[in-house]
Image (cartoon, rainbow, N blue to C red):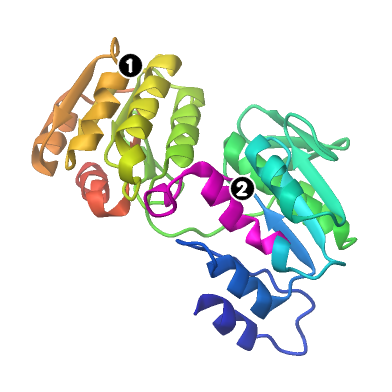
Amino acid sequence: IGVPKTLLELKTEHNYAVVEMAMRARGEIALLTQIAQPTIGLITNVGTAHIGRLGSEEAIAEAKCELLAEMPSDSVAILNHDNQRLLDTAARFWQGETITYGLEGGDLQGELRGTDILQVEGQEFPLPLPGRHNALNYLGALAVAKVLNIDWQPLTQGLSVSLPKGRAQRYELAGDVVILDETYNAGTESMLAALQLLAQTPGQRHIAVLGTMKELGEQSRRLHHRVGQKVKELGLDLLLVLVDDPEAAAIATGAEGIPTECFTNHQELVMRLKDIVQSGDRLLFKASNSVGLDRVVGELK
């Protein structure tokens, strides 16, 4: 009911409405698009979220592209150039005006400098949230602004965002210890992005504290293993896994060669962290919300 509720709150003084369309099954975005009739349709990513319900990444792509299939023919599609599955699927649903954006190419191409400066068309934009994944989302927003002829210049001064607890939160503790709190939720793509951000965060040791990603269905073990492989690829210093679901153990097997410890309850994990954390450590906490890693973060803060 979120989309209808948002639309019903619009008043005559509003010039634009930004409406997020979520889905967990086929047909849901189609229905929401029929209701909203958007003039611009932005698709930021196609990944593995809800793959347990939809069955495959291709099915997820098709479900997201219902936005393109159902929006008016004179609308503008804005697509993430760096996601090839999205581009291939979108081409089957949409032949209208299209703008692509990306860090690897596209009509609107940006360059990420460090982790928090995005350079586009000779202008630099401080990112409100660091990381490549956030830079791509920012590029998508810039593309929307360009279509609407909204001046980018004020954005070069930076902007701030307010996020719920456990989402893109950074805590700096005594003794030069930094916690990256991503305990609000987790999917494969967001997990990989968060690990990349951890590795790029200046510090002495980089420690990943991870747990289960829910709703991955038959693909769960494979995708958890992929997360472990990313830990190994990045050469992190230590991996701690809260195994509240058997599939989570695949993170550890994927990270073979990286010092790894597994835990079956929150208190054991808290006690171990309190014992090993030292000055200069950078710690990432990430799992699906129901895993409860936020409780562990709360014990350390």
Q: Of the numbered discs in the image, which one, if any, rests on residue 6?
A: none
Vertically, is 216 above or below 95? above
Q: Nearer the viewer, residue 91 or 252?
A: 91
Location of the C terminus (image quadrant): top left
- Tell which circle, 1 or 2, labels the residue nearer the N-terminal end: 2
Q: What residue is shown with label 1?
A: 237
Residue 260 coordinates in the image, percent (x, y): 22, 19
Residue 148 coordinates in the image, percent (x, y): 86, 63
The three-letter amino acid code for the residue at tag 1 is Asp
Magenta residues, as a range?
45-68
Horizontal relation, residue 231 to residue 104: left or right? left
Vertically, is 164 above or below 45? below
Residue at position x 59%, y 74% in the image: 31
- Residue 9, can we see it? no
Residue 124 coordinates in the image, percent (x, y): 79, 38
Kindly indicate the quadrant of the structure image that contains residue 238: top left
Circle 1 sits in a helix, a strand or a loop, which is it?
loop
Q: Tell me the distance, in whole angstroms, between the alpha carbons under discs 1 and 2.
A: 27 Å
- Residue 36, can we see it? yes
Q: Main secondary structure of the magenta part?
A: helix
Residue at position x 46%, y 35% in the image: 194
Q: Nearer the viewer, residue 288 or 205?
A: 288
Residue at position x 25%, y 46% in the image: 293
Residue at position x 77%, y 90% in the image: 12
Residue 6 coordinates in the image, percent (x, y): 59, 80
Q: Is residue 137 magenta?
A: no
Vertically, is 205 above or below 142? above
The three-letter amino acid code for the residue at tag 2 is Pro
Q: What residue is shown with label 2?
A: 128
